Each structure stands twice: as structure tokens, then as C-alpha cells.
Amino acid sequence: MEITEKMVEKTATKLSAEEIQRGKVLSVKWTPKLRYAWDNGPALGRYLAELKNGKIIAKKCNKCHRILIPPRMFCELCWVPTGEWVYVQDTGIVNTWVISYVDWKASRLDIKGGVRPFTPAVIEIDGATRGMGILHHLNEVDPWKIYRGMKVKAVWKPPEERIGAITDIKYFKPIE
Amino acid sequence: MRRVAIVGAGITKFYRNSMETPKELAYEAAKMALDSCEMKLSDIECVVNGTAPDAFDGVHMKGEYLSDGSGAYRKPYMRHYVGGGTGVLSPIHGWFHVASGMFDTCLVVAEEKMSCAYPHPAGAFLTIFDHTTEQPLYPTLIWIFAIEMNRFMTTWGYKKEDIALVAVKNKKNAIDHPSAQLPGEITVQDVLNSEIMAWPVNRLDISPTSDGAAAIVLAAEHVARRVTEKPIWIDGVGWCLDTAYWCTRDLYYPDYVEVAARMAYKMAGIKEPSKEIHVAEPYDPFTYKELHHIEGLLLAPRGKSVEMLKGGYFNRDGNLPTCPSGGALGVGNPIAATGLMKVIEIFLQLRGEAGKRQVPGKPTCGLAQAWGDLMQVGTVVVMRS
Amino acid sequence: MAKRIAIVGIGTTGFRATTPDVSYRELTYEAAMKAYIDAGIEPKDVGSFVSTAEDFFEGYSIADEYSPDQLGAVLKSIYTVPGDFIHSLASAYMMILSGIGPISVVQGLSKASNMLTLSEMLTFAMDPIYNRPLRESPHAVAALEMTRFMHETGTTREQCARVVVKNKKNALNNPYAGHSVLIDIDYVLNSEMVSFPLTQMDISPHSDGAVVVVLAEEETAKALTDKPIWIRGIGWCSDTPGLETRNWGEAIYAQIAAEMAYKMAGIRYPRKEIDFAEVNDEFSYKELQHLEAMRICKKGEAGPLTEMGGTEITGEFPVNPSGGCLGVGNLYELNGGHKVLEVVRQLRGEAGKNQLKNVTTGLAQSWRGIPTTTGTVVILSN
């Protein structure tokens, strides 16, 4: 009962992207209007509110003593409610990073034309337990000079532009 | 708990864009699977469907939409979901339908039509990130893969040119797979020269997006023995999901794969996987991932997989062939269907029916594994003839 | 040979129209905490977990990514069923019977208040080639079915309205309910017409909430609690998803799912052998259609029975003593979880003011909503 070429070739018909664009086959398009307003709850809600104030806040688990960022109402490893709120610094070290030539749609950036590649990174925030990272962007640094352990600091939007979102921090940049 | 066997399998051709609708792809695979063991839909007592993000096919409650194409008209039908791990969770989900004693036969169908998502299926991965803390940064899944590859390489000192051998091996293996989307003979230099997507990931390090479907038929022992002379037993199953807070995990090692593998090995009575598993299909959406998973599956000691790869250990004629099918890199990666394609490959290998892809040595024990989510889930199935 | 499986713990946050103070994480955590304490277990005792979620209801893809943390399931065996809660319950049931640990946990959640464009989402579930381009509202699909059902069974709009009155009144005494109110039939019939013959009051408003249920096999169940609620029968079925090929008058999916459950439970005369039921009443007529499909009433009998008060709390066959979807709120994929919760409460004697007397066997039935023809049934006994 080998699965053969002959059996398989009848099962699907190849189309090229160009054929679809040219309208060789009938097609339907639909752009769904999907909008949500997610309730963030007390932990993320406070995180966002503090970002608006230009501060980063974390929460402590009194069982494993980890200082958790992003803050959460319960520790996912100990499975107990977390304890006190703890302000942490807006500096950190780079745990790991990427040099990306594509955006979220997989479109190529015009690197040859001088566009800077994205350099997202996992940044371990100072004041939180080592290993606790958040995802954010790095900038004002040569992508090929980033290294593990590099010290970085947040670059904030001016207070009047902050809305209580992770993008209130524009990016992190290296500290000399 | 009863013994359950795979008795039939079917798979469609994988293309970047196929004309068929998701329902039709599911139907083709399901029909081939039933025909392969001469069973009819009326012999099937329940149907199980695996398909990953609804965002690809562009239908909410995609499981419902696929139910008739999967043969579930007026039958007990359930869908399961663990992102990319779905394809190997599919036989597990079907397995406990039968092992529990509630049903004697089960049809398992996995389908994905990624081409529906515009402007590019990769864009659908934006929505898997946390909507508040991560999506506003417009991340893409390639970033996490690149991050993980970076960690993997720097922890063990692995080099890109060595990891690229996985793509060379798999695309070559895929030349012999009838469903293959991107088979071919490439070189390490081709991989290194291909455009940088997100350093250290190059274009040829990544498996393509695909449209495709696969299906298998499961049966309880007494039915399996009637239906086929070569039932392939599902002897071990394991699955495990890690925390969603992926930034708190060190990505160099997939704990979730090890926990899932141990669960499956325990059930199958396997004490030394690197010796007792004869052929394996670890999930290979990216080149380094195959090695990452091989280490997580305890098939190679940590930090040693590249050395073994270079020595030909994982080639079809090596000590432990991995991805003899050609894997996701060579055959294609319609997320859920890929995992099931790997299960089907082991099924055929253990029956000696893998044609030109057959590994030598008459393997009697094989493993298929898939991964998914935010570097989170491991699903493992151990099969024996 | 077949072991008995029981529900040994339940936990819920209750259900209300909005839950702005908490995210899905805290909702599930609260329900899980209550369920684990009720069962007397900790996450480390659990062999497998099943969560229930649909991507486009949650608003992000691969919803199962965000399931383990709040259940204590990190690095454990957990997966998601995009289906009804009772599908997840069936999964957990089969996993225990297959030897995956003696204890299993099932979770469901609704954050319907966060879905701003609900109608678009339901339309997005329709066939992209044959149905969506017609831009028909999902409520129109329900109205088509209601018209056909009324025509085939002789059910009247007044009888459907009676269901609304009954359920919203029952909900008054249910501390978990989000949409209780005292109204009469005329109020229902005269409220704003949405899609004839469905008025605004015939349609369940939605609610948020979470439910977690703990299952255990017989020996473990008896060790954990002196009020195990046994799963006597369980069934689930999907009819055709196509609007063009379905039977509009009857809920065949409910019929087949019920027969599967009855067979397992050894039940031949459901009306006699079952004491009460929590059935899906997302749209008023659905309660009647489901009762008939499950042979609890003969064809055409559910309407008159309701009219005469036969399905009231004080009636001969109470239906939705909790208030159902109409009184508690439509919880989407969590609907089955709410039904199971209420049946367990009744069988344990914990249903407060709505407590039914001398009940030993209850039935929970659910439907996945427009535009599906997928339903589930579970029969529980104390």
C-alpha cells in the first residue's frame, strides 16, 4: 500500500500567485471586521497605567520569590496569588536578539535602500528576577554589534504622547 | 485500555496555492485513507479533526466548516488544537477515542489551507502574540525562531553551515515523496547564500507555507487485525504545553518536547530511546529545529546533534534516519497536515511500504513529533509494527 | 470493564454581562481555584487538562497558548478543544478511560463582552463561497430555522415566548445569573423585531464567566468526595455544516447525540428515567426543538407542555431551572459548561432557592450556536 505519485497527483491542482491575480480562477475576497476590547484585569492594567507614568512595575511571588514581569495576579509555576507590587528599573540586559529583514507581513524591508533592519530583543529588566524578560525593540545601535549581556535603557515617548501601552517605550538603546 | 492501530493513510499533494477548497482537500485525504484499507465511511464510528489557526483558511469555527469534508456527517466529531503540534496530537486524540473503549474505529483528518490568508500567511502569526504586551510591537514568528536559533547556536557553538545540512538532507529526501512541494538537490552554500530573513535565519532554512491535507484510519485491535495484515500500533503518546510567558524561558532546549517524549516512552516501555527508536520524524519547520527536537527527544545528547548530523548519523542509511520523508522543509508545511504526514511516513516505513524512501534494516519502532505555539508545545507518538 | 467516571469538583466565577475588572487569566484562575478546592486536589495531582476556546472568540490565534498558566498546567498535558465545553468533557472522560491519569480538568471561558463585532464573527463562520457573500445576518439563519420548526410542529410564537418568561424568571433566584427579569408573554412578543419571528427578547443576551470541572475515576472519586456525580452517558454529534443541505425543522444533531448518551446510560424512556434537564435555549424556540429532538417530548408536544407549566420548576419535567441561556446569558463555547455546572449543583443539593426535590438524574445538552449543527449531551447521576 505504497502511496504513489499517481494517487497523489489527482488530489490537488497547482495554482500560481500570478494566475490567481490574473483571475484565472474564480475567487471570493472577504475582509472580516474583527474588533475586540480586551479587559486586561488588575495586573496588566496596572502595568499599562504605570507605563503611561514612565515607570515599569512588576509583582512578587511570595512562594518562589520571583519578581515577575509582566506582572500577574498569580504565579504560574507556584499557582498561588502573587503578593506586593514592585517598581523595577527601565534598564536591563539583552538576553537574546534578532536582526530581521522582514516585517510582520513577511514583506522585505528595503535594506539596500538604507532602511534599518528590525532588531527585536528579549530584555531582562533590572530589578526583576534574572531571566525575566520582555519583548521589545532595540535601536540606536549597530545591529551587528549587539551581544548577549549588553546593557540597555528604555527610550520613552514624551509624557503627553503616552497612552498606557507597551509602545510608550519607543525602544531600548545601549548604555555607554 | 485497548491497543489501537493505524490501518490506513492518505495524503494530498502539497502546493503553495492549490485550487481546492479546504473541504475538498480534507475529502481527498480522507477518501484516500479509507480506500487504502478498503473501509467505507459507514465503518467509521467517529471522526477527529486537527487544523491549526482558523486565520489561515479564513473561516471562524473552521472545525465545523471542515466537518463534512472530513466525513463527519451525523457522526461524533471533535476538533483539537495545539497550534503547530496539532498534526501529531491528531492521532493521539483519535487514539483515546478508541483506547477508551467508546469507539472501535476513528478517522483522523488534518488539513490546512494557508494560501487563503492575504497579504501573506505569515501575517496571521501576528495574532498569536499577546495582544497587549507584544502585538503592538508588530512581531512575526520568524523573530522567535531566529531568537531560538541564536540561543541554540551560541549555547553549543553550532555553526550555520552545519545546521544547513538539515535542509540539504531533507530536500533531497523529499525528491522521493509524491506529495512534495519543494524537493531538490541543494548545497550548504545555497542555504547560506539565500536571502537573510531574520539573522541567523536564511530563506532556505525555512519550510514553505502550504495547502494540504492528510488522514489516517485508527482501529481497535480486533478490527485492525481483520482489516490489514500489517497494523501499526500506537504504543506511546505524550503531549505537553509550557508557559505562555516565553520571554522567561531559556529557549536553547525544548523542555516541553522532553516531557512529552518521556510520557510517550514510559507508556511504550522504552528505556533507551536513542537505541530503541529506529526511525524518527521530528518536526522541522526550520533547519535547526530538527536538531533542537532530536536533542529534546533524547535521541542525541545535548550539544552533540550537529556532530552526529555531519557524520551522516541521521541520513536515510545512517544509524537513526530522521525525516526520511523530506520533512516540512522538503515536502511542505501545511501546519496540521505536516504532523500527520510525519505520522504517515513512520506508518509506511514500519510496514516496509515507503518505496524509494524506505530506510534499510527493517525498522520496527518509530516516532513522530510536532511542535507548536510560542515555542511551547511538544506532541509525540511512538509506533511499532 | 468500563470504569465509572465522576465529577468531583466544580468552580465558577458566576456569569454577568461584563467583567471589566478582570482578564481571561484571572477569570479562569478563580474558577480553577474554586474547583480544585472543591475537589480537594492540587494541580500536581492532575493527569490531563482540556481547555475550550475558539480563536476568533478570544481574539487571538492559537488560543491554547494562553491556557496552561491559569490552570496550573505549565509543562503538563493540556490541549484545547475548539468546540463546546461538553466536547472537552468527553475528551477528558475518554482520556481517563485510556489510562492518562485518574484525574482530569476541563475548563471553559466566555469573554463575550470583549467581542465588539460579534455579528461579523458569526458571519465569518459561514461558508465563504456559498453563504457569506449574501451578507445575511446570523440571526436570520436562526429565524429561518424557527419558522420551519414552528411550521412542522405547530408550535406557536406564544409558546416560544413562554420559554423566555420562564427562564428569565428562574434566573431571578440564581445568584450566578446575569439577565434575570420578570416579564410576561406580551412583552416578549411586542419587543423589537430582529428577524421575524425572532424578537429581541427571544434571543439570549451574552455573558462573561468561567467554569472549571474536575473529573476522576471511580476509586479516586470516592476517596475525594462523598458526593461524586457520575457520568452515566455522553454523546456528541455534528450534522452537516452546509445551510443548503440541512434539515431545518429538526435538531438531528441533538437527537443523535442524545441517543448515544441514552444508550451508554441504559436509558430507554428519557421522560421517565431523567428528572430534569438543562438544555440550550440560546433562541427561545431552541429549548422546545431540543426537547423534542431528544425524545423528552413527542413532536409538537414541547410547546403545549411549556404552556401548561410542565417545564416550570414546579412542573413534571423541569427544564432550565437555572434560567438557561436566556436567563444566565449566552456563553458561546462555555454554554455546555454552565449546563453541566447547574445539573451538578442540583444533584448535589446545592442549587439554593431553585433546588428541585428528590432528583437523581439530570441531563445537560448544548449546541454550538449559529451557523453550526453540532450538539452534545451528557447525563449525570448522584
Image (spheres, rainbow, N blue to C red):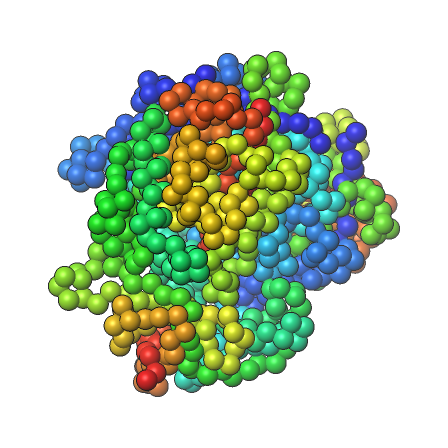
User: Is residue C42 left or right of B251 when viewed as pictured?
Assistant: right
**Where is residue A81 shown, x and y percent of the image?**
65, 71
Question: In this picture, is B235 found above or below A41?
Answer: above
Taking depth in this image into account, of A99 and C296 the one nearest to the observer is A99
Quadrant for the N terminus of chain B, please: top right
Give the residue displayed 37% in from the left and 22% down from the top: B356
Taking depth in this image into account, of C314 and B57 the one nearest to the observer is B57
User: Is residue B380 left or right of C323 when viewed as pictured?
Assistant: left
Question: In this picture, is A123 found above or below B11?
Answer: below
Quadrant for the C terminus of chain B, please: top right
Residue A42 appearing in the image: no
Residue C70 appearing in the image: yes
**Where is residue B324 shown, x and y percent of the image?**
41, 32
Residue extending furthest toward the front: B311
Give the residue displayed 32% in from the left and 46% down from the top: B164
Give the residue displayed 38% in from the left and 43% down from the top: B310
**Where is residue C75 shown, x and y percent of the image?**
59, 54
Taking depth in this image into account, of C42 and B42 the one nearest to the observer is C42
**Where is residue C229 shown, x and y percent of the image?**
79, 45
